[in-house]
Amino acid sequence: MKRITLLALCLALSACSVTRLPDNLSRAMLNQDDPEVVAAGAPAYLLMLDALILTYPENERFLLAGAQLYGAYAGVFAQDEDQAKSMADKAMGYARRALCEHDIDACELMDGPADDLAPGLKRHYTEDDLDIFYAYGAAWAGWVQANTGDWNAIAQVGKVKTLMSWVADYDPAYDNATVQVYLGVLESQLPPSVGGKPEIGQAHFEKAIELSNDQHLMAKVLYAKQYARLMFEQELHDRLLQEVLDADPYAESLTLINRLAQRQAAMLLAESADYFE
């Protein structure tokens, strides 16, 4: 009997450890201060997540972890456009499966008319569903970014905005205010001359900086890249980027992205004179 009890305890502890593994590894990666270490190690982690998902194909947490890491790799470490598209497709596929495991009606809502999305979210879902919808929205945004030459992809931007706005309405500071960064980028695609409203994007970037206590350095980089360059505001552009370079990058769950932000800020600042000439 003792052996059976001990075996059951070991199996329970092992299962618990496997379940926590994606979350713990994700946190470790986000707190890593050397992007090259993450770039070198991420492919092995991707393969491990693929194996976990094959073993537990209906596990929502593993599917979400797969969507998040494939999406991050596509956006940051992909070697070329084809790899970025492939990774973004994989992220979207895992996110879709996770959403359908969470609630099959949610998948049908995403596929339905754009005008039905906001009312459907408000009517049927609550803050308990934020994690799954945010992960789906992030994968969706990354997929659109990887397929900017496809008008079918561009046509889905409105739904992504609606989804991210719904998350932000419940929790404006969700994911270290990264939800505001997504909205800032999505709202800074077109200049006013062709019907864009970049001032809405600017407000989201400002809110991301405020809600993260000035620690989300990528918010400033994208504020400079998406808004300041769009509006041809060099003084704002250069100030934001210099603040990123002067900042302490170490912050819980933001260290890696802050290091990447500083790397990108240096490149954008070096190009500033030529861009605004």
Image (cartoon, rainbow, N blue to C red):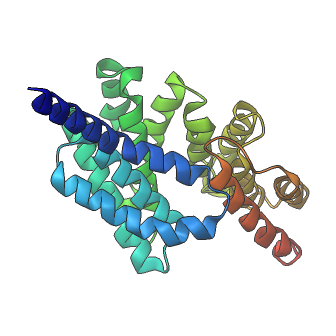
Residue name at image x 76 percent, y 61 percent: 262
Residue in front for this viewpoint, 272 or 216:
216
Q: In the figure, residue 121 lies in which quadrant?
A: top left
* Residue 71 x, y percent position in the rendering: 43, 58
Residue shown at the point (48%, 42%) measured from the top left: 161
Please give left or right for residue 146 compared with residue 46 in the image. Answer: right
Would residue 104 be found to the left or right of residue 78 on screen? left
Residue 101 position within the rendered picture, expressed as x and y whole percent measured from the top left: 20, 38
Residue furthest front in the image: 2
Instruction: Identify the residue at horizontal 80%, vertical 68% (top origin).
Output: 266
Q: Is residue 204 visible?
A: yes
Q: Identify the image quadrant of residue 122.
A: top left
Which residue is farthest left?
1
Look at the image and tell me whether residue 108 can be seen. no
Is residue 179 found left or right of 203 in the rendered image?
Answer: left
Residue in view at x 52 percent, y 46 percent: 27
Assign the C terminus to one quadrant of the image. Answer: bottom right
Judged left or right of residue 204, residue 96 is left
Instruction: Choose between 177 and 228: the one closer to the eye.
Output: 177
Q: Measured along the vertical axis of the image, is residue 58 above or below residue 246?
A: above
How many marks do you count on the picture? 0
Q: Is residue 129 above or below residue 261?
A: above
Location of the N terminus by quadrant is top left
Q: Nearer the viewer, residue 232 or 4?
A: 4
The x and y percentages for residue 253 are: 60, 43
